[in-house]
């Protein structure tokens, strides 16, 4: 999401013609789910990842104003192999948004991963993150909650 924010800030700058501009990009196929490191349930290293699905990026801004809205959704099938030779298959969905105007800004993110292992185990991860800033740049809300269930 960080790579998306820099162009958004530049697009929202004053001096445009005043109409609403909306851009949507849809990508189907293979994507990097960025699931690496140790298996959070067994500690075994994740040695390979395969993910395919759909990524949708959407931005709305007002060239003559100060408002910018952006969202993304990434969803699809995931297959992981860990160093214990357990293959996990399942589903991943990530969603995020960014809103900004001269009075406030906020950013939210959710992640859900549900995987079943070839050994009968399961991994479920859910994360919700949100922060908000007032017009003075003071953080008014900030939390990041993650739950992990191993079965």
Image: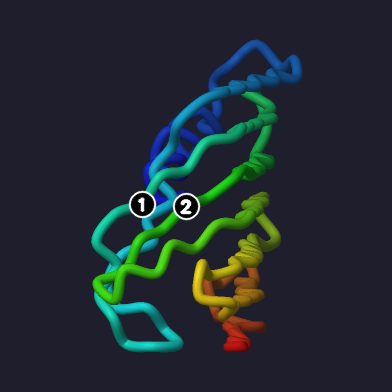
Decide: is 20 above or below 85. Answer: above
Name of the residue lying farthest toward the front = 119
Q: Position of residue 117 (x, y in %)?
A: 53, 70
**Residue at 50 percent of width and 36 percent of height:** 8
Q: Distance from label 2 to label 1 (Cα)?
A: 6 Å
Q: Is 28 in front, or is 133? A: 28
Q: Which residue is mark 1?
A: 49
Q: Which residue is mark 2?
A: 79
Q: Position of residue 56 (x, y in %)?
A: 63, 32
Circle 1 crowding by C-alpha within 10 Å: few under 14, some 14–19, many from 20: some
Q: Position of residue 92 (x, y in %)?
A: 61, 55
Q: Is 146 in front, or is 64? A: 146
Which of the numbered marks, if any, corresponds to residue 23? none
Q: Position of residue 4 (x, y in %)?
A: 45, 40
Please say if the residues under marks 2 and 1 sit with CB atoms less than 8 Å apart: yes
Q: Quadrant of residue 87?
A: bottom left
């Amino acid at each position: 999401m960080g790579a998306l924010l820099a162009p958004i800030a530049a697009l929202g700058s004053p001096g445009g013609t005043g109409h609403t501009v909306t851009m949507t990009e849809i990508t189907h196929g293979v994507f990097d789910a960025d699931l690496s490191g140790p298996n959070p349930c067994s500690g075994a290293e994740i040695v390979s990842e395969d993910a395919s699905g759909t990524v949708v990026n959407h931005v709305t801004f007002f060239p003559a104003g100060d408002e910018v809205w952006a969202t993304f959704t990434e969803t699809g099938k995931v297959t992981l192999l860990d160093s214990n030779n357990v293959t996990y298959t399942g589903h991943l969905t990530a969603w995020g948004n960014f809103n900004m105007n001269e009075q406030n800004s906020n950013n939210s993110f959710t992640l859900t991963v549900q995987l079943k292992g070839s050994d009968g185990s399961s991994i479920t991860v859910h994360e919700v993150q949100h922060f908000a800033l007032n017009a003075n740049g003071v953080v008014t809300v900030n939390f990041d909650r993650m739950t992990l269930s191993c079965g």
